[in-house]
Amino acid sequence: MPTATPPRILCVQAHPDDETIWTGGTLARHCAAGGQADVVTTTWATGAPRHRELVDALATLGLPRPPIMLGYADGGVADSSALPALVDAAFDETVAALTGHVRALRPDIILTTDAYGIYGHPDHIHTHRMCLAAAEAAAEPHLYPDAGPPWQVSSMYFVTVSQSRTQQAWEQVMTARVGGHEAGADQLTVDQAIRFGTPDDRISAVIDVRDFLEVKWRALQAHRTEFARSRTLRAIRALDEPTRAALLGWECYVRRDLVDGGRALFG
């Protein structure tokens, strides 16, 4: 019996490293099975240090092409781009740019963050909204007619975190010690992580990526700038392997089909 062709995936994330920490195992597993995937990052300029790190990370995950950078400034790093901050740019302009890439790449599935940007980061929330608008616009021939022929995305998968899986692993992150000092976390306490997570009965897909955890971890470490900045990532690096696997070994999504039946990530 013939095997169905894997869906084509477009992963759209706000910052370099988001594609790896939230979806890296999914992307690695998909590419290892012969699937096609591309990454669009909505912030940071091409040629910036974090862009070059992202190129290395995607190669480690097995993606055949470098990332597409929309090039807006990271809201927390003014010198990340000469363009305006993503959240300050004209929304129609950002949607038009993303729509052009959706039409050119013709993905069956778009991966992006959930409506609250996983933990409330404005760039994540804005990227989520851009993806919703671009997925609809891409199928509408009267919108952005110069951006290529229309294309219908079948399904969107919104990255989220499971409340039940988060609590124990995040407590370990919060108490990990780096260099003899309490590592803590940059943006999340344990209570916040659980509150921002999604109840298990609302999660559509939990992808087991433990077989690709070593690849995902190597790709994440390519983001050297973020490890230097982020106490959270340094705390994750300090975890023992079983605890790190509990934190990074599953990737959770809420699925939204845009056509009847949609497309599944796997199976």
Image: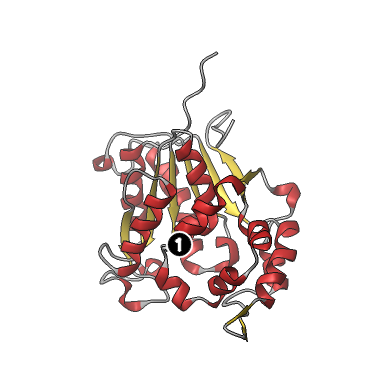
Can you see residue 185? yes
Q: How many labels does the image show?
A: 1
In the displayed structure, does residue 149 sit left or right of residue 243?
left
> Residue placed at 57% from the left, 57% from the top?
115
Label 1: which secondary element? loop
Residue 91 can be seen, yes or no:
no
Residue 74 placed where, x, y %?
39, 70
Relative to residue 190, is residue 33 depicted above or below? above
Residue sitting at 38 percent across and 66 percent down?
86
The structure residue drawn at horizontal position 63% and vertical position 45%, both measured from the top left corner, is 208
Q: Mark 1 — residue? A: 17
The answer to which quarter of the image holds residue 179 is bottom right
Q: Nearer the viewer, residue 22 or 112?
A: 22
Q: In this view, does 131 lie above or below 258?
A: below
Q: Mark 1 belongs to which amino acid? A: Asp
x, y (%) of residue 199?
74, 54
Residue shown at the point (30%, 44%) measured from the top left: 144
Circle 1 Cα neighbour tier, 10 Å, few/some/many (<14 / 14–19 / ≥20): many
Q: In this view, does 223 lie above or below 101?
A: below
Q: Position of residue 266 (x, y in %)?
A: 57, 34
Q: Is residue 2 left or right of residue 148?
A: right
Instruction: Determine the image quadrant of residue 139.
Output: top left
State which quarter of the image contains the C terminus.
top right
Of residues 193 and 93, which is closer to you in this image?
193
Which corner quadrant holds the N terminus? top right
Q: Where is residue 148 in the image (x, y as percent from the top left)?
A: 27, 38
Of the pair 229 and 7, the residue shown nearer to us: 229
Of residue 220 and residue 196, the one placed in the foreground of this image is 220
